[in-house]
Image: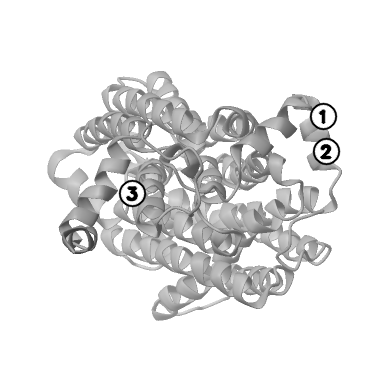
Amino acid sequence: MKMTCTAFHPKLKTQNFFDKMNNPDQHSIHPTHPPPATMAWFMWGLCAVFYLVGFFHRVAPAVITAELMSDFNVGAAGLGHLSAFYFYSYVAMQIPTGILSDRLGPRRLLSAGALVAAIGSMMFGLSSGLMWAGIGRLLIGGSVAVAFVGMLKMAGHWFPSRRFALASGLALFAGVIGAVSAGIPLRWMVTHIGWRPVMLGSAVLLAVLSAVIWLWVRDDPEEKGFLSYAPVQRATKNLEKSGLLSDIAAIIKHRNTGLLFFVPAGLVGCVLSFSGLWGVPFLTTHYGMTVVQAAGACSMLLIAWAVGGPVFGGFSDWIGRRKPLYIIGTGLAAIGWDVILYWPGIASAWILPLLLVTGFASGAMIISFAFIKESVPSHLSGTATGIINMGIMMGPMLLQPAIGWILDRNWDGQLVNGARIYDLSAYHQAFLLMTAWVILSFVLVLFTRETHCRPVS
């Protein structure tokens, strides 16, 4: 009787959970049960915090454009390149990250990535010139590139397949929380303590997070004595039979790979180019908003995007279809951006509702990760995810500096407190790149092949 009472004591059950977290080597030889949801979400959540901080750095330049232009004496083109340094290394790391995630596991990558990101954040905060600031952004982008792919790899091992699209959507939600913190909260902190101390504070947070991930996170439930949803042994066996080039060739030959490389790039490129850099100066200059109000509007765009991700992902899992919802999302996003940027005489009161609808619709891009996972052999899912994420980040990587270049080409010489001011005609010409890409995304998604939420045979 005493043993029965003890087994169900809630305090002892909680202690048992943390004992297993702290003692990964003490597990059963023959696991018979999947991992507890609390344990799975706990580990995944630690990885999500890393992605959150990485997303903070992704869009932080949007609300400190004036400070960066003044401190580093640059115009729109220079600022666009400084912001895009994050994306240059982020994109370059996607395929290596996917391959290393498949072969080495996400735990090592995430821990090392957080440490390198801490170094990059410190360099950016201490930089005295544009070169060192660019190197800092380059290190941040390349290191946080492992976060999203690592989280998806973790989800494939720790969650059943029916939860994968939902986990992908929640990953985006976690990232956008970081982006929102780079809106009004960052603006408030910059006003009171300056942008450099904020960057140094994030460096400390990343260093601590690196140690925590190394100590707590494990790649697969079998390391904790539970059944895996993606057995390590089978994946390793398949990977040993193939090389890097053959892995990539096997992924590219699938029809959806090429299409999903470009489709979400248009959605993400528009969201991050607007909210991550050019939205605040556009809204303050031409819609009479204060910097705080414009930062808030861009944050609301990101929040709507974050909400749209799990809604589209979860609903896609529920109906067992990927393509129809993706078509709806890209179509609404294309219409939304066209109205926001080009509809003549639009009232300021309509801007926020339009940004909310457009951001929500853009959340359909999260379907890409479940879509590609079901379009290639399972042992190549990490590499395939890296390829798709590489395509996604090419959107803001190319659009941010290109928009800045067009703005500088059409600048009429107006300056306010050392920062360049661009007229509405200049923005209209620059934003044509955004609208063209999102329209292309809508066209391309029509040619994708439905997977019905079933892995490729």
Q: Is residue 123 above or below residue 226?
A: above
Q: Residue at x 59, y 28 (%)?
A: 100
Residue 63's label in the rendered image is: 3
> Quick one: SS at disc 1?
helix
Q: State which tag comes first along the sequence, 2 or 3.
A: 3
Instruction: Check contact, mark 1 vs mark 2: CB within 8 A.
Output: yes
* Residue 80 percent across, percent down from the top left: 50, 38
Q: Quadrant of residue 351?
A: bottom left
Foreground: 54 or 105?
105
Label 1, residues with CA under 10 Å away: few <14, some 14-19, many ≥20: few
- Left or right of 364, for residue 345: left
Crowdedness near tag 3: few (<14), some (14–19) or many (≥20) residues, C-alpha within 10 Å: many
- Name the residue type under label 1: Ser
In which quadrant of the rendered view does residue 208 lie? top left
Q: Of all residues shown, which one is farthest toward the front?
A: 1
Q: How is the image coloured?
A: one colour
Question: Is residue 138 shown above or below 45?
Answer: above
- Front disc: 1 or 3: 1
Q: Examine the rendering and report whether any part of residue 137 can be seen.
A: yes
In the rendered view, does 103 fall on the left or right side of 273? Answer: right
Q: CA distance from mark 2 to mark 3?
A: 42 Å
Query: Is residue 317 placed above or below 25 in the rendered structure?
Result: below
Which amino acid, by three-letter code, is at mark 3?
A: Val
The disc placed on residue 246 is: 1
Disc 1 vs disc 3: Cβ atoms closer than 8 Å?
A: no
Residue 397 is situated, as x and y percent measured from the top left of the image, at 58, 40
* Quadrant of image for the N terminus: bottom left
Q: Which residue is mark 2?
A: 250
Distance between the Cα atoms at labels 1 and 2?
A: 6 Å
